[in-house]
Image (tube, helix red, strand yellow):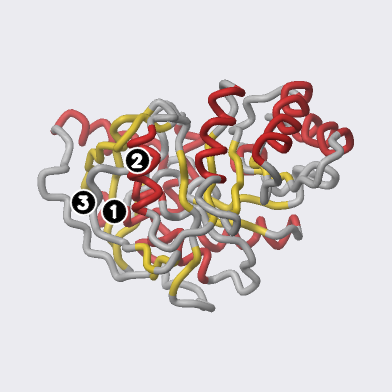
Amino acid sequence: MDQSLLESLRVVALPTKTNFRGISVREVALLKGEYGWGEFSPFLEYGYEECAPWLASAIEAATKPLPTLFRKSVKVNGTIPATNDKSVIDSLVESYRGVTTFKVKVGENLSEDIVRLARIRSLGRDVKIRIDVNGLWSVKDALTNLYAFYEEVGPFEYVEQPCATLDELRELKSSIHIPLKIAVDEAVRKAKDPFAINLEGAADLVMLKVQPLGGIARAHEIARHHKLPVVVSSALESAVGINYGLALAASIEDMNFDCGLATGSLLSSDLAHLPIVDGEMALSEIEPNYEGLEVSAERYEWWKNRIMKTAELL
């Protein structure tokens, strides 16, 4: 890893508006190179091996030019976390200006999930709903819950990672008797080798997250390998990482789904403002403003050491 990248290191702590995946503060490391800033923000519990593609993505963003882009802005979905706090949901919905597709986090409590989904369904007949389970269900639970959702709330655009394993997803697809597309996320991005897995009979869509998959070039390779439609989504990044996700989405010629890149609305503070206009977000040249957001010297050294240890694996 180039020493100049390490010397450019900045680390910030971004508070979230509500608990999201157990997170109330999102720590993010930034590296600056010839082509701008790259973000390295694997979740704190990840080991060095799992961090490696995240660092490869940050280095790519900072040191490589963008590929050909087919659009200047990207249609996005809103993300609703696993809460039924009306004020939180109303505030988030208001922040997603012009958005007509919502991804709703579900999976831990059926009755509470139905209330949350019904709230989003009430926004209008034209609203599309996709649900994200993060692999929490068994096949039996998935069948029970999906039938209940379908009966109470109506059809969904797709369900993301309802079960953890590909064998479970195949069993679910072969057993369920309602119109349903399955998207895979963790099954691809957490695979030791995402090129070695077989998605046949298990998935209809692949979620692409630029950091966990190792950058734009590798995300394209994975998409070409699996030959399935894709949706670009975020890993709760800062505006720097979101902007790179927008670049990935803009570089995919055949993009037929709204992308999960509006998660900046879940943060109380961010490094830059990426507005949502008429349901779309435009790529920007970002110069992050980290004033008042930088971490303590101790946390800075923790991240610096994490980067150096991870770089040994690249």
Image position of 3 (left or right of 101): left
| Residue 103 makes an appearance in the image | yes
Identify the image quadrant of residue 231: bottom right
Residue type (three-letter) at the residue carrying disc 2? Ile
Q: Residue at x 61, y 74 (%)?
A: 253
Mark 1 to mark 2 CA distance (whole Å) = 10 Å
Mark 2 to mark 3 CA distance (whole Å) = 12 Å
Q: Residue 267, relative to residue 214: is it above or below?
A: above
> Residue 280, how many percent across, how many down?
44, 67
> Residue 200, how many percent across, how many down?
84, 47
Give whichever of discs 1 and 3 has the lower sequence position.
3
Q: Residue at x 40, y 49 (%)?
A: 93
Few, some or many residues within 10 Å of mark 1 (<14, 14–19, 20+): many
Q: Nearer the viewer, residue 312 or 186?
A: 186
Identify the image quadrant of residue 81: top left
Q: Residue 273, relative to residue 178: is it above or below?
A: below
Which circle marks residue 307 in the picture?
2
Mark 1 to mark 3 CA distance (whole Å) = 8 Å
Dot 1 and dot 2 residues touching (CB under 8 Å):
yes
Residue type (three-letter) at the residue carrying disc 3? Glu
| Residue 214 makes an appearance in the image | no
Few, some or many residues within 10 Å of mark 2 (<14, 14–19, 20+): many
Which circle marks residue 31 in the picture?
1
Image position of 169 (left or right of 303): right
Q: Residue 109, relative to residue 6: is it above or below?
A: above
